[in-house]
Image (cartoon, rainbow, N blue to C red):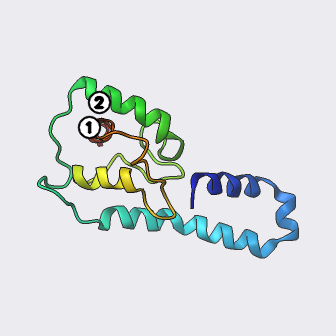
């Protein structure tokens, strides 16, 4: 589901009069939205790390790289993942255990039906900065 679709669904959910005429649709949307966090949480944890690094490890990002990643995150990722990566429409990223390679692949290719691909928007340096920022917010 694209971000535009999520915005439309959100707008529909706020329009209570629409659901008085379409109760089965309301039940279906609520059902899907209620299990989505469970699916996302399971999918993020079930992914196997790729690349040379162990899960959750990263080369220490410089302060400049982390700062650049934070700027990119706030502009592009925070609407779904929250201002500090705590999760909102998208899953929390504060306990992310994916390798740098897996994080970069997810950013580039997205997650079908859940997260758009940013490969054409970000350069490799941007993705490295985002990865450094994500490792810096681990709790």
- Left or right, 3 with respect to 44, comes to right
Residue to which mark 2 is pinned: 66
Q: Position of residue 13 (x, y in %)?
A: 74, 57
Residue to which mark 1 is pinned: 132
Which residue is rendered at x = 54% and y = 52% of the image? 89
In terms of secondary structure, where does tag 2 sit? Answer: helix
State whether residue 98 appears in this view.
no
- Left or right, 10 with respect to 73, comes to right
- Left or right, 120 with respect to 79, comes to left
Q: Residue furthest bottom?
A: 24
Q: Residue furthest left?
A: 52
Using the rendered view, name the quadrant where residue 69 is placed. top left
Look at the numbered discs 2 and 1 and tell me whether their residues touch, using CB distance below 8 Å.
Answer: yes
Q: CA distance from mark 2 to mark 1?
A: 5 Å
Quadrant in which the C terminus is drawn: top left
Sequence-first tag of 2 and 1: 2
Which residue is rendered at x = 41% and y = 33% of the image? 72
Which residue is rendered at x = 46% and y = 33% of the image? 74
Q: Residue furthest top?
A: 64
């Amino acid at each position: 589901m694209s971000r535009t679709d999520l915005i439309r669904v959100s707008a529909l959910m706020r329009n209570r009069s629409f659901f008085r005429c379409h109760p089965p649709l309301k039940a279906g949307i609520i059902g899907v939205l209620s299990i989505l966090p469970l699916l996302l949480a399971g999918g993020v944890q079930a992914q196997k790390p790729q690349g040379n690094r162990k899960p959750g490890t990263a080369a220490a990002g410089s302060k400049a790289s982390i700062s650049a990643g934070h700027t990119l995150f706030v502009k592009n990722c925070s609407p779904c993942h929250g201002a500090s990566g705590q999760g909102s429409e998208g899953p929390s990223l504060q306990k992310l255990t994916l390798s740098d390679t897996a994080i970069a692949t997810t950013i580039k290719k997205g997650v079908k039906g859940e997260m758009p691909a940013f490969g054409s928007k970000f350069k490799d340096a941007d993705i490295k900065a985002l990865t450094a920022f994500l490792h810096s917010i681990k709790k």
